[in-house]
Image (cartoon, grey):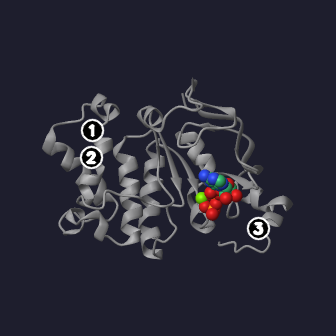
Amino acid sequence: MPDEIILKVEQLTKRFGGVTAVDQISFQLRKGEFLGVIGPNGSGKTTLINLISGFVKPTSGKIAYRDKDITGKAPYTIACLGISRSFQMVRTFHKLPAFKNLIVPLYSPRVKKFGGGKYGERDDIAIDLLDDLGFERDSAVPYKMAGSLPHGYLKRLDLARCMALRPDLLILDELFSGMAMSEVAATLPVIEKFNREGLTIVMAEHRLKELFRVANRVIVLNFGQKIADGTPKEAMNREEVQKAYLGTEVEG
Ligand SMILES: Nc1ncnc2c1ncn2[C@@H]1O[C@H](COP(=O)(O)OP(=O)(O)OP(=O)(O)O)[C@@H](O)[C@H]1O
Ligand SMILES: [Mg+2]
């Protein structure tokens, strides 16, 4: 079903005390889409991702994933349904080698269902995933303690962790922040390939130029509200969007 709606967000709201971080947001996502989520600092991007992935419970509204109501469900339950998210602030198992950081998703019931493999094979899967993201298998990098790796590697390790879950929906929160230009340039085509192979992707990103190379649709948030939804060009041409970005640095 090429037009299958994979995610349906309805009137989603999250208030933290007096702050409405996400304000009555609705949108739908079709299978295979690549949706960018943009907006100035504090506009609600991370909160929206936290709501969809279960890390924060909504004040009101509804989230459905493939016709299943996932509103307020636990992160673990949502992950096992096939929604994987990365973190703006990456946290790893610092005292484990990089490739061992993929243990949790690789041993999840979801991956077991795919016929997860035996002990050693899982390590091979981890090394394969990391190799695609620039942790060269013949170098020492995949075997180094995660805590000793530079920031750009940690962001890519977090992406590999997401992919280890074999997600149907991948949600990336500022994956490119803190990455060197060369790392972004190397990672973009990999993400593009995941999308071409059928993975649905949502990407909150400040680096607009890079985002617009891969996303065919964007939603723009401002003070928790959705102020635009369309192609990057349509969205950026809207007056409300230009006003929202006024005084902030727009890359791209
Ligand atoms: N746990 C929390 N408690 C209180 N307020 C919060 C909490 N999380 C987020 N907020 C507030 O909600 C608003 C939206 O924040 P959020 O982190 O979702 O924005 P963002 O678009 O991801 O920003 P950035 O671009 O800086 O990452 C901000 O005003 C923020 O201070
Ligand atoms: Mg954020």
* Image quadrant containing the C terminus: bottom right
Residue 9 percent location from the top left of the image:
66, 36
Callouts 2 and 1 close, C-beta under 8 Å: yes
Q: Residues within 10 Å of mark 3 (few under 14, many from 20)?
A: some
| Labels 3 & 1 near each other (Cβ < 8 A) | no
Other residues around mark 1 within 10 Å, as few (<14) / some (14–19) / many (≥20): some
Residue 118 pos. (x, y %):
15, 37
Query: Badge 2 is on which residue?
Result: 103
Picture disc at residue 11: none
Q: Amino acid at mark 2?
A: Ile
Tell me the tag on residue 107: 1
State whether residue 59 is above or below residue 45.
above
Whether ligand 2 has any atom under 8 Å from the Cβ at mark 1 is answered as no
Mark 3 or mark 2: which comes first in sequence?
2
Q: Is label 1 in a helix, a strand or a loop?
A: loop
**Which dot, 3 or 2, sits closer to the camera?**
2
Query: Which amino acid type is marked by label 3?
Result: Tyr
Give above or below for 151 relative to 235. Answer: below
Q: Position of residue 63 (x, y in %)?
A: 62, 32
Q: Residues within 10 Å of mark 2 (few under 14, many from 20)?
A: some
Q: Quadrant of residue 7?
A: top right
Label 2 secondary element: helix
Q: Is residue 37 visible?
A: no
In the image shown, does 15 or 119 lie closer to the viewer? Answer: 15
Residue reaching furthest to the front: 17
Residue linked to disc 3: 245
Q: Please name the residue shown 71% across and 41% down the image.
A: 13
Which residue occupies the foreground of this view, 59 or 29?
Answer: 59
Q: Earlier in the sequence, mark 3 or mark 1?
A: 1
SS at badge 3: helix
- Amino acid on which disc 1 is placed: Tyr
